[in-house]
Amino acid sequence: MSSNTNILILGASGMTGEETVKILTQAGFPVRVTYREISELTKLRHYAFEDIHADYNDVESLKKAMDGIERVFVIQPVTENMIQHSQNICEAAKSAGVSHVIRISNMVTGPDIPSEIAKMHYESDEMLKALGVNYTIVKGANYYQNMLFSSLTIIRHGNFALPLGTATVSQVDARDIALVGAHALVDEGHENKEYTITGPAAMTMHVVARKLSRCINKEIRFIPVEPRMATQVFRDNGLPDWSAEAIGKMFIEYASGKYKFVTHDFKKITQQDPRTYEGFFADYRDSFLRETITPLGS
C-alpha cells in the first residue's frame, strides 16, 4: 500500500466502515468520512480523519463530500430508498471527477432473485459499472458479527433462533471485508473487478452453535424457526415493516443453498487467510458472556 491517495468513506460509522478507517489511518493514509448525525463519529474518535456532513438523499451534499477525492468506498445501509441513494452517489461521483468507486454488495445478486436486498444490490452494482469510472465491487457473505444481534438471547437462555434450518451457509468476518476494501482503495490492480469474499468454510448454524459453545464453555443451542416467525421478531425488535420483510426474505435466500460456496478471493487480495468463526468468537467472547449494548452497522 502506498500513502499518497485521497479517500472518502461513505458509511464509516458501521462495523465495516469503522474497521476500514482503523486500517487506513493506522497505516498513515489521509481519510475523509461522512456523517449524517455528528454522534456517528463518536466511535471513530481514536482515529485521525477529516469529516464532512453528507446525506444519501442530498446529491449536493454528496458532491461536496467528494470534492477533491480520488477514491470512494461506499458502504450503504439497506433501505427501501437504496436505489435512489445509489443513483445520487453515482451522480455525485461522476460530477466530482472521482476516479475509482469501491462498493460493498451482496454475495449473490440478480434481477430475478426473490430477495429485495439482493435485487437492489444488483441494480446498484450495474448502475456503478455503467457509470464510466473505475469500480470495484466487493460481494460479501453474511457477517459473523450478525451473531451479536442474538447475544442477549444466548446469554439469558443459552440459545439463538434463525430461519436457516439445516442449511449450509458461507459467512465472513466484517473485518475481512474492510481489509479487502482498504486494499482496493490504495493498491493498483483492482479496477473494474468484482470479488466475492467468504470465510474459509461454509457450515450450518448447528455447527456454529457448537463452536460458540466450546469458546464460552457453555452449551448453546440453535433453534430453527419459520421465516414468518423471524420476520415478526424483527418487527418486535423495532425494525420497520419494509426492513423486517426484506431481511426475512434474505434469510429464505440464505436457506436456499445458493450461499454455501466458498471463494479464495480474500487470500488472493490480501495474502492472508480469512478469519475463522472460532477466531471471531474468541475476539468477541465477552459479548456472549456479559450483557452489553453492542452497536452494529453495515
Image (cartoon, rainbow, N blue to C red):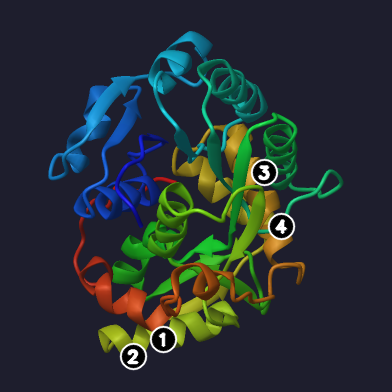
Q: Give the numbered dot on residue 221.
A: none
User: How far across and down, in percent of the image, does residue 144 sit?
Assistant: 45, 67
Gap between marks 3 and 4 measured at Cα = 10 Å
Q: Quadrant of the N terminus?
A: bottom left
Quickly name the residue at label 2: 214
From the viewer's perspective, is the residue at label 4 or at label 2 nearer? 4
User: Can residue 264 be seen at all in this image of the molecule?
Assistant: yes
Kind of residue indicated by mark 1: Lys
Residue 98, above or below 21: above
User: How far across and down, in percent of the image, does residue 125 sit?
Assistant: 69, 40
Q: Quadrant of residue 167?
A: bottom right
Gap between marks 1 and 4 measured at Cα = 26 Å
In the shown orientation, is residue 149 left or right of residue 134?
A: left
Residue 55, above or below 238: above
Residue at the image position 16 percent from the left and 39 percent from the top? 48
Disc 4 vs disc 2: Cβ atoms closer than 8 Å?
Answer: no
Question: Mark 2, residues whose alpha carbon is within 10 Å: few (<14), some, or many (≥20)?
Answer: few
Q: Does label 1 or label 4 sit earlier along the sequence? A: 4
Disc 2 vs disc 1: Cβ atoms closer than 8 Å?
Answer: yes
In the shown orientation, is residue 109 left or right of residue 63?
A: right
Secondary structure category for the residue under label 2 = helix
Q: Give the numbered dot on residue 117.
A: 3
Out of 138 and 290, give the one closest to the viewer. Answer: 138
Quickly name the residue at label 1: 211
Secondary structure category for the residue under label 3 = helix
Residue situated furthest right in the rendering? 112
Question: Mark 4, residues whose alpha carbon is within 10 Å: few (<14), some, or many (≥20)?
Answer: some
Out of 208 and 36, give the one closest to the viewer. Answer: 36
Q: Give the numbered dot on residue 108.
A: 4
Kind of residue indicated by mark 4: Val
Disc 1 vs disc 3: Cβ atoms closer than 8 Å?
Answer: no
From the viewer's perspective, is the residue at label 1 or at label 4 nearer? 4
